[in-house]
Amino acid sequence: MSRRLTYLCRGTGWAHAARAAIVVPRLRRSPAFADVAVGASGAAVDHLNLIGMPCHDLRVPDELDHSGYAAHRIRVLLDSAARPDVVLSDELCFAPLVCRAMGVPCVLVVCSFRHYRESPSAVPAFAAATRILLATWAEVDEIPHALRHKVTAIGPIVRGERHDRAAARAVLGLPADAFVVTASFGSLNSAKRAYFAAALTTVILAWRHAAESDVLVIPLSEETVHDLTGLTPTAGIRCTGPTPHMNEYHVASDVVLTVGGSTTSHAVRNSVPTVVIEPPVGSIEQRNAAYLASTTPLVTVTTGRESAAELYELLRLTARTDHGPCDLRWGDASDLENALCAV
């Protein structure tokens, strides 16, 4: 018998919404589910609107997505229509507590167990989940002993693109023979503002050593870039503003600059060389980048403290290096479908 599913999506960046863009269409095609409703918070609402996926706005700002207020808003959503038979929560970690109170099974998807380890109030929420899927590799984030019986590490869920580089450039209007780099640091939010400012300043200064035909893509407006860096983008720097075509820009690039998280994983999944400008020490992005750098030559991690000329030469060298195949286990929408069908 087909069941009603509610899919909850956290904001705080675009990674969760990008995952929803892959998973939700698969779940809506599945005969296991009669209806799939989507609720989202913070930046996820903006990204889902950008890609044309309607969702219910939970009206929870990013800074409150792990809070009692978020739990209240989730309960309001789940009570507002026909009660779901099962809930999938993509890192809105208090959803399992709400679902347990309602007698509804909940599959929780997380990118790491940072919140479990750092916030005592989150421990009962994780314990309340029916199943937990870790959307990275177990080598990147150790599974807490108390949760191991219900956790499966499935790997990152990122899209494997159909376009090759030439086709992607044609779609995006990029020169066929240019050296193209995309600065893909995810969505700009208050927690990442200092990182964006430092990383973009470094990259823009490096681009002063670029050839006239080179193209640097930055998915922010010129005004935002100037506000962050105090620098005015010059010829050869394309500021696109927020765009639904980030995946295509990755594939179109010779090199992608990333922070170490989901954008790094997407680049690697699609065999695009990536240079990671060192993320904050101890962050999940740093651990993910370090693991990938130890696993595949597609990933180079740099401190960003090189001279501008040295960073530009590193980008050129990274593009020229023979990287070979990358053998990693990637998550898939079917992993979530199977987990939901099993509860």
Image (cartoon, rainbow, N blue to C red):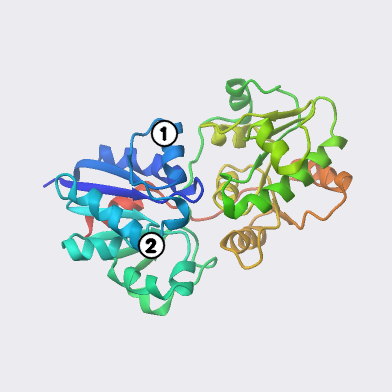
Mark 1 element type: helix
- The three-letter amino acid code for the residue at tag 2 is Ser
Residue 297, numbered circle = none
Most extreme residue toward the left is 1
| Left or right of residue 329: residue 72 | left
The residue drawn where x is 63% and y is 30% is 165
- 120 vs 267, left or right, is left
Q: Position of residue 217 (x, y in %)?
A: 68, 33
- In the rendered image, the residue lying farthest to the bottom is 145
> Label 1 neighbourhood size at 10 Å, few (<14), some (14-19), many (20+)?
some
Type of the residue with mark 1: Asn
Residue at image mark 1: 49
Q: Quadrant of residue 92?
A: bottom left
Task: Name the spot of residue 233 as percent of width and height, x first.
Answer: 76, 31
Q: Earlier in the sequence, mark 2 or mark 1?
A: 1
Where 73 sits versus 102, above or below?
Answer: above
Residue nearer the viewer, 271 or 131: 131
Residue 299 lies, in percent from the top left, at 68, 52
Residues at circles 2 and 1 in contact by the CB criterion of under 8 Å = no
- Nearer to the camera, 90 or 342: 90
Is residue 298 at all visible to an observer of this figure?
no
Residue under the image location 61 percent in, 33 percent down? 249
Would residue 69 be found to the left or right of residue 315 on screen? Answer: left
10 Å neighbourhood of mark 2: few (<14), some, or many (≥20)? some
Relative to 9, is 177 above or below? above
**Residue bearing mark 2:** 67
Residue drawn 59% across and 60% down?
A: 288
**Viewer-side residue, 52 vs 67:** 67
